[in-house]
Image: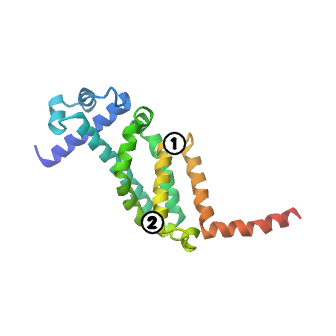
Amino acid sequence: MSLSEAATTRERILDGAATAVALHGLAKFDMGDVSRSSGLSRGTVYRYFPNRDGLLGQLVQREGGRFRQRLLEAMEQAPPGPERILIALEHATRHVHEHPMLQRLLETDPAFVLRGLRAQFAGIKNELRPVLAPALDQLEPVRSGAAGVDDLVDWMTRLMLSAYLFPSASPDDMAGKLMAVFRALSPAGRSRRKTGTPRHRGARR
């Protein structure tokens, strides 16, 4: 079997595992479910992944990597500034709604999800920093010296993960509210709020 064929088989197994978890959760998940979902024999599944825990560990790594890659690609295509922050928040709040395996895990096995996020937190933060930092550098807390860019990258990463762990019934609404907080911290947002007050009072006259 060539390397490309082996990689394809491995992906089929991981896809089958994701489907099995979405259907059964972890409590009833076994290698037989993976075999049926992937359309491969048990022997093939065990040849690539000798045990259940190893397979689940690889599945978590793959899904986390896919999410980060999609997020980074989307943010890098946006112009520097608040638009990148909005895209990051939208991806974080929508991801769980569009991923049946993650929905099942959050409902039935939150401890498993938390262990995975803790293990990958530093890596997620380091990958997000280059695309988040230019926008965060313009916020009032950084400009005033109250906080550093690294502090805000850490805060934003935790905020996005919390949006994933505690999803809203309306992801777009949640992303909009989080973005409003971000804009309130920015010099432009503060300026708009200040200049908006006299116009409002003048209109009332």
Residue type, label 1? Pro
Position of 87 relative to 27 (above/below) = below
Q: Residue at x 39, y 38 (%)?
A: 111
Q: Quadrant of the C terminus?
A: bottom right
Left or right: 199 with respect to 60?
Answer: right
Task: State the residue lying farthest toward the front.
Answer: 146
> Which of 51/102 is in front?
51
Kindly state the secondary structure of the residue where label 1 is placed: loop
Q: Quadrant of residue 130?
A: bottom left
Tell me if I can see residue 91 in this picture: no
Q: Quadrant of the N terminus?
A: top left
- Residue 32 in the image: x percent, y percent? 24, 26
Q: Quadrant of residue 129?
A: bottom left
Q: Mark 2: give few (<14), some (14-19) or many (20+) Cα within 10 Å.
A: some
Q: Residue at x 49, y 69 (%)?
A: 148
Q: Nearer the viewer, mark 1 or mark 2?
A: 2
- Residue 7 in the image: x percent, y percent? 19, 46
Kindly state the secondary structure of the residue where label 2 is placed: helix
Position of 153 relative to 171 (above/below) = below
Q: Residue at x 31, y 29 (%)?
A: 29
Q: Which residue is mark 2?
A: 150
Q: Which residue is mark 1?
A: 167
Residue type, label 2? Asp
Q: Quadrant of residue 114?
A: top left
Tell me if I can see residue 119 in this picture: yes
Q: Residue at x 17, y 48 (%)?
A: 4
